[in-house]
Amino acid sequence: MTIRTRFAPSPTGLLHVGNARAALFNFLFARHHGGEFLLRIEDTDKERSTQKAVDVIFDGLAWMGIEADAEPVFQSARQDRHTEVALELLEKGQAYKCFCTPEELTAMREKAMAEKRPPRYDGTWRDRDPSEAPEGAPYVVRLKAPREGETVIKDLVQGEVRVANAEMDDLILLRSDGTPTYLHAVVVDDHDMEITHVMRGDDHLTNTFRQAMIYRAMGWDLPHFAHLPLIHGPDGAKLSKRHGAQSVVDFREEGYLPEALCNYLLRLGWGHGDAEVLSREEQIKLFDLDGV
Ligand code: GLU
């Protein structure tokens, strides 16, 4: 089996060093195992995605010497396929149409909070016949998520992580305007791109449980997951603007060399004995997840 990783940034105007590090790890892991590293631009949020933001990503990666092994995939171009999979789930009875109005959803949330329960979708339309809905009423497509048992992820960095299925609700696959949600699109794309290892920041760990449910509903094999600890500032908080430089471009403008930035990002969360400065060749030779 060919090992295949990907970097899947959302083009929001900045190549954050946390993302750049994820890109580097994915790239080195693929190279180390003689596999392939792919790039996917997650540009489904039309309001926030611009060509300029896409160029920032391409430039930053090129500057860091991180090269993809195929043309980049643009998530927005794959919307028909995302829809197709959602409809297939509907057909298989693994998903259903939910006709709840925004008012009903708000009332549901308020009731749950008043009763000190987590504000989850209560499954109103899970087993209801869609013919009971008013004619032409808008609907979303929700996954019929398992309610019993647990979802277990054997994460290559975090170890075994488990969540009771009762803790999760029926996530939305298609919105009422027919557009796919981000959680759904990522699963379909990773599956179709034959990604074997999904390595990303551990702020995505909760998404992984929900995504695992989509894989299972489709009968698809799960990729391996590796959730990387995030980069924090000296105060222990997630790196953000108030800590100063946070994007690859900031460092370039301050005069840092790409080799220095890559070496630093690599050693931030990965190590190999006392090795402090590693050439790209050495990085490829030595990088593996057991050093994370
Ligand atoms: N597009 C997501 C982000 O930029 C990454 C999703 C993923 O790696 O699965 O945070």
Image: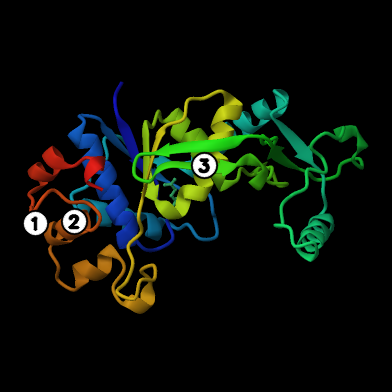
Taking the spot 41% from the left edge, 31% from the top edge, the residue there is 193
First-in-chain label (3 vs 2):
3
The disc placed on residue 276 is 1
Q: Residues within 10 Å of mark 1 (few under 14, many from 20)?
A: few
Q: Secondary structure at mark 2?
A: helix
Marks 3 & 1, CB-CB < 8 Å contact:
no
Q: Amino acid at mark 2?
A: Arg
Q: Which mark is residue 288?
A: none
Please determine whether, in this image, residue 165 is positioned above or below residue 16. Answer: above
| The image quarter in which residue 105 lies | bottom right
Q: Answer yes or no: do the residues labelled 1 and 2 have beta carbons within 8 Å?
A: yes
In screen coordinates, is 3 left or right of 121?
left
Q: CA distance from mark 1 to mark 2?
A: 8 Å
Looking at numbered disc 3 in the image, what kind of residue is underneath it? Arg
Say what amino acid the circle numbered 1 marks. Answer: Glu
Which residue is the site of mark 3? 162
Of pointers 1 and 2, the one earlier in the residue sequence: 2
Q: Does the rendering let one see residue 199? A: yes
